[in-house]
Image (spheres, rainbow, N blue to C red):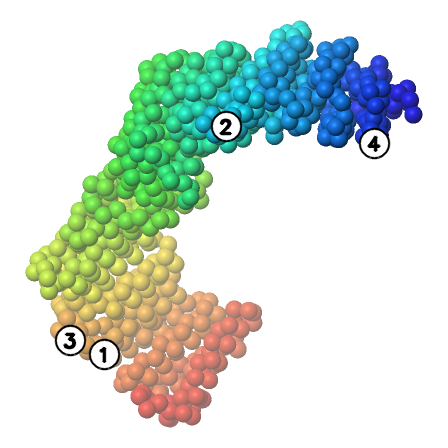
Amino acid sequence: RDSRTANHAAGTALRSRGAGKVPRRGAGDRETRVVSDETMPGQTQLMDALKHASNMLGELRTSMLSPKSYYELYMQVCDELRHLELALLDDIQRGSAVKDLYELVQYAGNIVPRLYLLITVGVVFIKAGQVSRKDILKDLVEMCRGVQHPLRGLFLRNYLLQCTRNLLPDAREEEAGVDKGKDGIVQDSVDFVLLNYSEMNKLWVRIQHQGHSREREKREKERQELRILVGTNLVRLSQLEMVDVRLYRRSVLSGLLEQIVSCRDPIAQEYLMECIIQVFPDEFHLQSLGEFLQTCGELHQKVNVKNIVIALIDRLAAYASRTDSPGIPNDIQLFDVFSEQISVIIHSRTDMPPEDIVSLQAALINLALKCYPDRVDYVDKVLRYTAEIFAKFAEGGDAAAGVSKELLRLLKIPIDSYLNVLTVLELGHFAPLLEYLSYAARKEISLYLVNNALDNNTTVPTQEEVDRFLQLVDTLITDQKDQDDAELNIDPEDFAEEQVLMGRLIFLMQAVSPDQQYLILNAARKHFGNGGDKRIKYTLPPLVFAAFRLAFQYKSKQEEDDKWSKKCNKIFQFCLQTVSALAKGEKRAELSLRLFLQGALAADRIAFDNCESVAYEFMSQAFSLYEEEISDSKAQLAAITLIVGTFEQMSCFGEENHEPLRSQCAVTASKLLKKPDQCRGVAISSHLFWSGRTKENPDAPCRDGKRVVECLKKSLRIAHQCMDSTVQVQLFVEILNRYLYYYEKDCEQVTVTVLKQLIDKIREDMPNIESNEETEQINKHFQTTLVHIRHRQETGDPDGRDYAGLVL
């Protein structure tokens, strides 16, 4: 098979890869296999093989391909050259006379094929050990200067780098022995790679300046596709095992940075600086921080230095936080070095966007938290510097408005790291930074703080810390001057959810001693009291219950504190004032009523010296609120039911206070607007005359059967006055159940005769009411009542009266 057939096959392959036109000549794998197929190839066969290889390599001289297509062609050629390399190496090892092969391939007609063949033969000679490795490498890297076309030169030097990756000298001078002049030392490898890197970078940068300016974006895209070729040099340097920190600082890093600064190309500078960060060990970075960061300040103004510095900070912070890491050496003041150099960079780049400056500060905080978790002052130092920057922005206009997102991210870092809002409170410059945020951003950070405290159950133990924390989240407590109409008209559900969080926060304000807790509640009251009508209905009730809980704490310590009773009295004054303030708002009467009743019940349970007066005041306030603010009939019945239910459980009133209160309940119930409500209210009030207890006899209920029956009879009279027969029968059934309750509780005034009359009345009226779902429920209730009576007749009750004599 002659070369024409092979060239035709290669041309077909190149067309399929988008070469644009049929190449002049090409070579497939058949030509290179000629070398390996012959057992002892002679000089003529070797020359033919090199000729075919040269023809094939000539295709790499094309200027018609894009970088991507050129790379595909390059990879195909490299595959074929590997066959040639193996064949040549096999011949040399068999003793073939190929001593002049290195000079022979230099007669190739074109520079590109010649250098590819020189590299291939040179690698073979190095592997065969017949020539000086050091001299061959130096010779090859120097001769590659002959190709100055950017695309061809980059791939040629990449081929050199790939072929020599396992052949670079990697021994220290003291370990190299007598052959160090021939084999070379690690310094020779460093020089070799640095020279190749420098030339490749120049070729890569040159692409930027070719062609018309309107194709700049296209060239930049092509450069991004080719950048890995230059970066491979740094990978080779990092793979040299004998490169220690001293050699790295003296030769490797200095050589890399010198080329980066001198090229003055933003794309190259940013990429190569990031490559240095990624490929070299963390220990090297720690020992060379000054040089690296100083170079960052010397880069082109268009280089995004922020990304470079943040990448280095993130890597070192991750290194410090690894479990298998020895940590940051004591002799390296990592935070101080970064802080100083970042400050220099910011001052040297007057056009750096504000958001980039904040991002750098955020990265610095991240470094301080991971490398020095106990140094709160480091974080505060960054916040102070950030506040100074924003103060300058404020002088020059509203420059800080566009960086709220970055500033928010910065402020959230210590919150997430410490997981303790008390530590955040130690940051003296945290709160001043909030002033530079918009209302929405301040609200977001406030919610973030509150949720963090709630999620981590962080207690706030002192009045001073409570004050500082509530000032920090003041956006959620009071209206702000910079709120616009849209923010004022927030969705009610979202607003309620926010305020419920604030209510929950109150129960995290827990002092060690009750006296300190009282101071905390007073401090919280001052803050939450300014929240306005919309907020206090969510925040003041939890405050009141926290005060009740404190009063119970004093009661539990009455043996240790002889002033506990006076302190409880003071707490209830605090609660009375707080609930009264809450009651002044619209649509909060029912909530305030419940809190007044809860206060009366708490005073009764604690039983301190002045509890009767305090409880009476709470009950009277509940009655006043009922009379003045509650007008809806259903709400009135619900309120009087609550009042009766609360009063029935209390035993702190003497007879002189108990009697008028229970009478007031009955009178108030009888004055309800609707007759059914009157009937039910009066029936409920009857329990006060039966179950109510006084201070004189706290264990003996009133058991005033006469007044009980009076209430029940009055409720019957009111029921008779109802015009709706269905409602009337329903009320009769309910009153019958009240009578049965008192009958079973041994109320002598409730007799079988009365029960019989009421049952007969219900049976008489039941058929006359209209049949519907409601009447079915009424009839079911009545029948269930009769079943209960029959059951008691059959089984009896040793603890109560039976129903003997009652005929159903």
Counting from the top left corner in percent of width and height, residue 637 is at: 35, 61
Give me the residue at 85% from left, 19% from top.
Answer: 44
Q: Amino acid at mark 1?
A: Arg
Point out residue 703 in the picture as x, y percentages from the top left corner.
23, 79
The residue lying furthest to the left in this view is 562
> Which is more foreground, mark 1 or mark 4?
4
Mark 3 or 2: the one toward you: 2
What residue is pinned by disc 2? 177
Q: Quadrant of the C terminus?
A: bottom left
Q: Distance of mark 4 from mark 2, alpha carbons?
A: 38 Å
- Label 4's element? loop
Q: Kindly indicate the quadrant of the structure image that contains residue 452.
A: top left
Q: Which residue is mark 3?
A: 697
- The residue type indicated by label 3 comes to Asn
- Residue at image mark 1: 703
Q: Nearer the viewer, mark 3 or mark 4?
A: 4
Tell me which label, 3 or 1, sits earlier in the chain: 3
Residue type indicated by callout 4: Thr
Measured as percent of width and height from the top left, residue 484 is found at 40, 28
